[in-house]
Image (tube, rainbow, N blue to C red):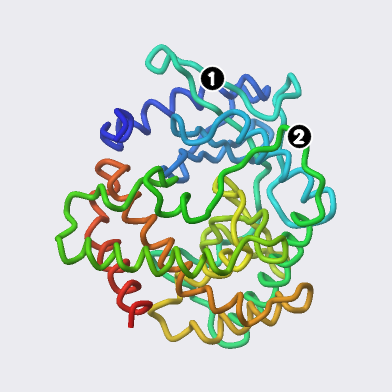
Amino acid sequence: MSAWAELPRERQIALHDAVAERALACWGLEGARIDLLKHRENTVYRVTAPDGTRSAMRVRRPGYRSDAELESELVWLMSLRSVGIGTTQVRPCLDGAAFAHVETEALPAGRQCDVLAWVEGKPLGSIEEGVALEGEALADAYRRLGELLARIHDHGESWQAPESFTRIAWDEEGYFGRKALLGWYGDLEILSKGERDLLDRAREATAEALGAFGKSPDRYGLIHGDLLPENVFLDGDHLSLIDWDDSGFGWHVDDIATAMLVHLDRPTLPAALGAMVEGYRRRRALPEDHLAMLPFLWMARGLSYVGWAHSRGDTGRAMAEDVVDQACTLARAILS
């Protein structure tokens, strides 16, 4: 666990507040007001310029993404927007760079900062509170989300990325390998022997299923990687995706799996999943054997959340029991 993760949450926010204030000059935003929106993997602020224009600034946690990975994320976002796909708009620095390194006296190593255009509308929901939509409104939102997602996957399959392009991979190693992206689940101290054995068996079953499924281009490529309801914004009939920090390479159906996490223990699952699959199939093939991977991808993400609970200090510890319970529930389901 990093020294940063061990700092109290309030101290982390205060340090990043100072970075955000100093970063404003890189975009010519001196005098703008900054308001904290969230503090998770990154610290995100609403920036309101003196003329009232709003933007979102991300001050990124140390070591989470390399400069090359961040540059690649922003390049992909710009490419998606260039073909009319609803993503956040990158706002370059005054010097033309896609992001800035900003140092303060308290953080001499600096932080990566980037600014994105403000996205109008409201999030579809949240992982904690769920999705409030019902009936046809729920189905319509997920049909449109499925169609948008198919366009993103089509783009990723045909796009000629620059040679320098590099992003993370949400595969077996990325989810539950010893160097998993969010931390290895086996390091969480509160796991009992029975829980650890259960998760180990579920990991083996998941690795076997995903390995047999394979990584051919019709099923594996660039994905959003974090399609939780708070990252899906609705503004009337317009739908946009935000928070591409976890975008990278993975199974296409994994984006659908992530979008359904909020519905797993709720009666809305059949309607939301059915509508999302319907919308996706309007644009792109989605065979039944791809959908058969959903339980294993839910399991993979469940294991990654257990690893996250270990690697994120006080924030992770506060949620550790809940994520272990969820992972064990998923494990029993796939092993039954």
215 or 279: nearer the eye?
A: 215
Q: Gap in Å between the C-alphas at discs 2 and 1?
A: 27 Å
Q: Mark 1 Cα within 10 Å, few/some/many (few <14, many 20+)?
A: many
Task: For the N terminus, give its image quadrant.
Answer: top left
Residue at 56%, 65% in the rendered image: 254
State the residue at coordinates (64%, 38%).
Answer: 166
165 relative position to 301: left or right: right
x, y percent for residue 253: 60, 68
Could you tell me residue 92's position as x and y percent?
72, 30
For mark 1, give the secondary structure: strand
The quarter of the image holding the C terminus is bottom left
Indicate left or right for 224 with 323 as reference: right
- Mark 1: which amino acid? Val
Vertical position of residue 102 compared to residue 124: above or below:
above
The image's mark for residue 327 is none
- Under circle 2, the secondary element is loop
Instruction: Of the two numbered discs 2 and 1 on the same chain, state the one appearing first in sequence.
Output: 1
In the rendered image, which residue does mark 1 sit on?
A: 102
| The quadrant where residue 123 appears | bottom right
**Pointer 2 residue:** 163
Residue at image position (30%, 50%) is: 309
Looking at the image, is mark 2 or mark 1 nearer the viewer? Answer: 2
Q: Is residue 307 left or right of residue 133?
A: left
